[in-house]
Image: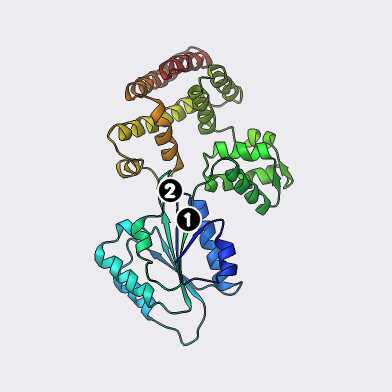
Amino acid sequence: MLQLSDKTLKKSLAADGLQKVYLIAGNDAFLINTCAKTVLDAVFAGGERFVTLFDAQHTPDEELEAFFLSFSLVSEPKAAVFEDFSGAALNKERAELLRSLLAQQPDDVTVLLKEYVDDKRFFVPKKSQQLLDGLRRAAVVSATAKTGSELCVYITAIAKREGCSIEDDAAQRVGELCAGDLLLAENEIRKLAALSGYASITRAHVDALCVRTPEAGVYDMISAIERGNAKKALGVLEDMLDERTEPLAITAALNIAFINLYRARLARDAKRGERALFDLFNYKKGDRKVSIAYERSARYSERQLADILGLLYALDKKLKSTAAEKRYVLEQALVRLMAKAGAL
């Protein structure tokens, strides 16, 4: 069984040829989808595509058997893609059935198992790998979320694919604003490419287009607070207000951010991992803000976060009822928030 990564997949396709089964597992949905596309491009080589999609969790056993045990009179490349695959979610009978079907799949069929693992420290699940043990021509592809300079390389590649280039500091800023989520970064790059006239994306383009949302501004504010840079946090607030961002929208974004931190802190205190947040709360699968909140929650105590949420509740109520200048109300509340967070 081949052990590959998103960076070595193309090289393996050229050197080792196409495998019959690919387990593509990772903690970045963009990279998982990119790897799946790379395999499918190799399967069909520019010809007509015959792809069958399966819901890995809910497709009945009979439908799986019907697909794998049928055959065509004309041999042509086909692919089966299992979305939302999870080795841990398979019971013993389902795992045995799938292993049996994979062992006897037709030569003209390539199977892709796409598994998203919502864990910051990614590893390929053992149960999923075991499903491929003993199979002829099988590969495990790790699609691990990128950080730092490696993340910038991917963002630069996305820009190139969109028909433009991007300056290094602009790529770094996109990565920060998207919290390392390449799916979000791809969406931002598409907008930035159009803004730049499909030339070179600069930091000014990013600041003009990407930093205008309350969520992005709050991300910068909290980052500054956590670094103890009160002047920077107040500066971000001033910029947002100067750009006519609604005070209530800023408060709402702050409230959501600290609710996520509070939930993550409770999970930590209960000796639970970030996966528990997806189980307990209505987060969309793969939501990167959960990982960010879990990582950052270690900086705060449960008491601190509870106090901050109380402050934000009072702020929201005051903004909706006071005739006072909302800019000063927000500035005053932010100073109090920074004091509770230990930034002053």
Q: Are marks 1 and 2 in contact (CB under 8 Å)?
A: yes
Disc marking residue 122: 2
Q: Residue at x 60, y 23 (%)?
A: 239
Q: Which mark is residue 12?
A: none
Q: Residue at x 45, y 42 (%)?
A: 288
Real-space CA distance between mark 1 and mark 2, rounded to the nearest whole angstrom:
9 Å
Q: Position of residue 266 (x, y in %)?
A: 31, 32
Residue at 58%, 69% in the rendered image: 15
Q: Which disc number belongs to residue 142?
A: 1
| 31 lies above or below 95 | above
Residue found at x 59% / y 33%: 211
Looking at this view, is 317 or 97 the one in front? 97
Residue in front for this viewpoint, 177 or 274: 274
Mark 1 surroundings within 10 Å by alpha-carbon count, few (fewer than 14), some (14 through 19), many (20 or more): many
Q: Residues within 10 Å of mark 2 (few under 14, many from 20)?
A: some
Q: Which numbered disc flags the more N-terminal residue, 1 or 2?
A: 2
Q: Secondary structure at mark 2?
A: loop
Query: Is residue 188 in view?
Result: no
**Can residue 71 be seen by looking at this rendering?**
yes
Disc 1, SS: strand
Which three-letter amino acid code belongs to the residue tagged 1?
A: Ser
Mark 2: which amino acid? Phe
Residue 38 locus on image (x, y percent): 56, 63
* Rendered view: 122 above or below 83: above
